[in-house]
Amino acid sequence: MNAIQEGTRIGFRNGLMELAEKRGDVVLVSTDSLLALRGEPFAQKFPHRFIELGIAEQNGVAVCAGLASAGLTPYIGTYAGFLTMRACEQMRTYIAYPRLKVRFIGCNGGLLGGNREGVSHQFIEDVGLLRTIPGFTILCPADGNQTRQAILASADTDGPVYIRIGSGREENVFSPDDPFPLGKIRILQDYGDDIVLFTYGFTLGRVLEAAEELKAKGVKAKVVEAATIKPLDAEGIAGVLAKTKCALTVEDHTVTGGLGSAVAEVIAEKAPAVLARLGLQDTYGESGFPDELLDAYGMSVNTITRTAEELVSKKRQL
């Protein structure tokens, strides 16, 4: 895993500016969130394609509906919960129902911004909320490089797209040129078929580290990134589960409604397997440093490794 180079917020900004250089339809809409999005260079370079609305997320989504109806492609970003909770009805009814091409950027997904902002600015429910709304594409890139690639890859996706980003402190796992696998899972490590570790976003580096520790202990794991939560690559997930019949999901999100629930649905319908889900267990986060919070809420390398060992043992007893 590389040192911190370019967090997800700057990755978003860079990807958006690349698009705007090539396309005249790209517009950035801010609800007093330009600084949070690291978007000042965009506003300076494209002042006529930047709209500032102040703290008015519901109105911001309505404005985006109008822009999209007129043939533009608006990108609106702010803290994840201020979009997916405060403006959820507008996202559903004004954007998703008519399948308008609006792109939503949700900052501070998960616990990663924990020492600057507590529970009011940590968002662990956003993916689960939007999974229930028909027509949404949900992307969860792991780092700044992948955020930039996700912006580029999803530019022509039909209907609304939600891209979950973090606090801007994410470590880069991928190189700048690695493409974003829109709509597909990606096997990042393959040591064997004892267990598959599914993850996305900011826990990816920890899961890769855990796979190395499991290998040293004689447990052969696959690491699978599911960065597109919706539409889910159910066939790809089922194909991996058919080989391992044992799965552990790890996510900086509540275990209810996120990747853990999505994999459980695949297991129930397509590929029976032993499953455990690591993430926030029906609880809120606290203030604290990001790594300490992930450790405290069951996403440490040690917890991932121990849980995987327990699952493999359980599988062998069945």
Image (tube, helix red, strand yellow):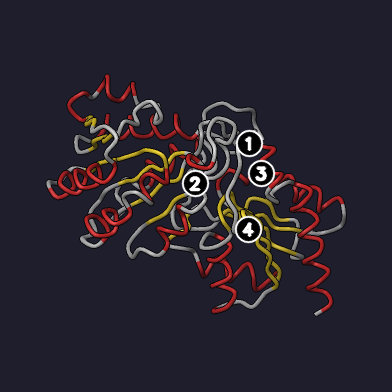
| Residue at image point 27% right, 39% down | 56
Q: Position of residue 203 (x, y in %)?
A: 62, 46
| Residue linked to disc 1 | 290
Residue contact between numbered discs 3 and 1, judged by CB atoms under 8 Å: yes
Q: How many labels does the image show?
A: 4
Instruction: Specify which label sits upstream in the sequence, 3 or 4.
Output: 4
| Residue linked to disc 2 | 123
| Residue linked to disc 3 | 294
Q: Whole-Å distance between the Cαs marked 3 and 1?
A: 6 Å
Q: Whole-Å distance between the Cαs marked 2 and 3?
A: 14 Å
Instruction: Specify which label sits upstream in the sequence, 2 or 3.
Output: 2
Can residue 233 be seen by looking at this rendering? Answer: yes
Left or right: 230, with 224 as reference point: left
Q: What element carries label 1?
A: helix
Which of the 4 quarters of the picture holds residue 152?
A: top left
In the image, which is nearer the foreground, mark 1 or mark 4?
A: 4
Residue contact between numbered discs 2 and 1, judged by CB atoms under 8 Å: no
| Residue at image point 47% right, 41% down | 165
| Residue linked to disc 4 | 281
Q: What element carries label 2?
A: loop
Q: Position of residue 187 (x, y in %)?
A: 61, 55
Classify the position of the N terminus by image quarter: top right
Q: What element carries label 4?
A: loop
The amino acid beneath tag 4 is Gln
Q: Whole-Å distance between the Cαs marked 1 and 4?
A: 17 Å
Decide: few, some or many residues near mark 2? Use Cα within 10 Å; few <14, some 14-19, many ≥20.
Answer: many
Q: Whole-Å distance between the Cαs marked 3 and 4?
A: 12 Å
Residue contact between numbered discs 1 and 4, judged by CB atoms under 8 Å: no
Q: Position of residue 132 (x, y in %)?
A: 40, 65
In the image, which is nearer the foreground, mark 3 or mark 4?
A: 4
The amino acid beneath tag 2 is Phe
